Image: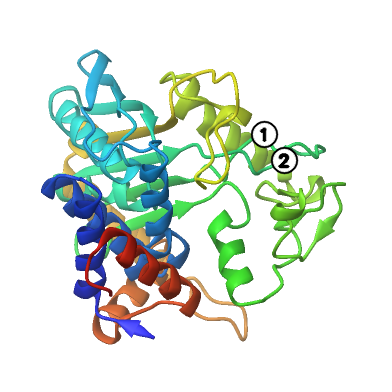
């Protein structure tokens, strides 16, 4: 079934309000989750809503956080998210980064004591309207084994960069540091499809196409999948995100990051507070005139679009093209929601005593 975007947004907003969120924060959370569904990242949209509510029910997510800067310089800050939804906390962090960039040329905010923040690209894109480059990353619960290991040590730890252009659409890179986000394994499980080779390994370390590999004790693989194809590079990227997001901010890192799912308890003996993010904003005119830069971005984008495709392959795209195409279609035809997700949402509406979707 497909549902109008505004109806999906209204249901998400009503759910957060029913759980005690402020009107402002419910709006911010609904916008972030809707953005994921509109951009085709179905694993991080309304399908995640029940997970946030369950965390709130377990008192692991604070619907009325008192977010505070606990340390800062003119261009940097550490933000304590007070166990708020990362969907809201990360947006607050980007607002701070943008304001610091206005003054210092760049602004960098490390976040601790937060939760899952949805798609990284959404937070990076908030800088675009300010003639700034946005950067966002987050660590996540340990599901990924480092190269040569069977132990889960890192999250899928995404990185996003949003760069404005002039007449062309912005460059928006949003990628996990694994071949796929964990949510895509969940999507494959819902659809009863095998996962591609190279996404995960068994608990013994053998490659597998089982969509339940993680539930059977296995692990996700770093970007590159194996040593011969550069998994050590994916491992390094994931480690970088973990260190910037958590070791720098005072959040939990590595195997101590609390899981998103509520039925698993956070690891004992935490080394920090909650989940961590790292958010940045770069003022373009701190480097060269913004109009000049954006004209050259247009030129860059046009050049890459003209790159000759391999025979039988589609035209070359720039990062963000595919998501923009999906968003345009879904704003017209609606957002597809799988029947299993709808079952969860129906139960959620009963739990929260709100109108069903």
Is residue 306 visible in the rendered image? The answer is no
Is residue 178 visible in the rendered image? The answer is yes
Instruction: Locate residue 291, reporting x and y percent.
Output: 15, 49
Q: Residue at point 62% right, 84% down? A: 311
In depth, the one of 38 and 160 nearer the eye is 38
Find residue 330 and report its image quarter. Answer: bottom left
Instruction: Locate residue 66, reporting x and y percent.
Output: 20, 27
Q: Tell me the distance, in whole angstroms, between the alpha carbons under discs 1 and 2.
A: 6 Å
Q: Which disc, if any, is residue 145?
A: 2
User: Upstream in the sequence, badge 1 or badge 2?
Assistant: 2
Q: Is residue 156 above or below residue 245?
A: below
Q: Residue at point 26% right, 71% down? A: 8
Element type at mark 1: loop
For label 1, the residue is 153
Q: Is residue 184 above or below residue 87?
A: below
**What colour-coding does the image apply?**
rainbow
In depth, the one of 293 and 355 nearer the eye is 355
Element type at mark 2: loop
Q: Residue at point 22% right, 45% down? A: 127
């Amino acid at each position: 079934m497909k549902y109008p975007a505004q109806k999906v947004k209204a249901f998400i907003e009503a759910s957060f309000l029913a759980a005690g969120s402020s009107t402002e924060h419910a709006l911010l959370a609904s916008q972030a989750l809707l953005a994921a569904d509109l951009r085709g990242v179905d694993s991080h949209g309304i399908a995640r809503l029940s997970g946030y509510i369950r965390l709130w029910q377990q008192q692991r997510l604070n619907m009325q956080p008192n977010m505070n800067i606990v340390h800062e310089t003119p261009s940097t800050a550490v933000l304590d998210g007070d166990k708020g939804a990362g969907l809201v906390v990360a947006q607050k962090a980007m607002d701070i980064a943008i304001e610091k960039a206005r003054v210092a040329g760049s602004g960098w905010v490390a976040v601790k004591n937060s939760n899952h923040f949805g798609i990284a690209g959404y937070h990076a894109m908030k800088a675009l309207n300010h003639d700034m480059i946005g950067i966002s990353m987050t660590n996540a619960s340990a599901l990924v084994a480092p190269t040569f290991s069977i132990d889960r040590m890192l999250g899928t730890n995404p990185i996003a960069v949003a760069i404005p252009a002039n007449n062309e659409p912005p460059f928006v890179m949003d990628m996990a540091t694994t071949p796929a986000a964990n949510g895509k394994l969940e999507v494959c499980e819902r659809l009863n499809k095998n996962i591609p080779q190279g996404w995960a390994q068994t608990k013994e370390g053998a490659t597998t196409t089982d969509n339940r590999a993680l539930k059977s004790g296995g692990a996700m693989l770093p970007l590159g999948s194996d040593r011969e194809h550069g998994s050590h590079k994916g491992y390094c990227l994931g480690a970088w995100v973990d260190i910037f997001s958590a070791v720098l901010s005072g959040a939990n890192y590595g195997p101590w990051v609390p899981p998103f799912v509520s039925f698993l308890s956070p690891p004992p003996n935490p080394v920090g507070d909650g989940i961590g993010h790292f958010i940045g904003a770069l003022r373009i005119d701190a480097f060269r005139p913004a109009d000049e830069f954006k004209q050259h971005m247009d030129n860059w984008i046009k050049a890459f679009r003209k790159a000759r495709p391999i025979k039988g392959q589609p035209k070359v795209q720039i990062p963000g093209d595919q998501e923009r195409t999906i968003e345009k279609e879904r704003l017209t035809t609606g957002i597809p929601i799988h029947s299993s997700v709808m079952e969860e949402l129906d139960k959620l509406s009963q739990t929260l005593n709100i109108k069903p979707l």
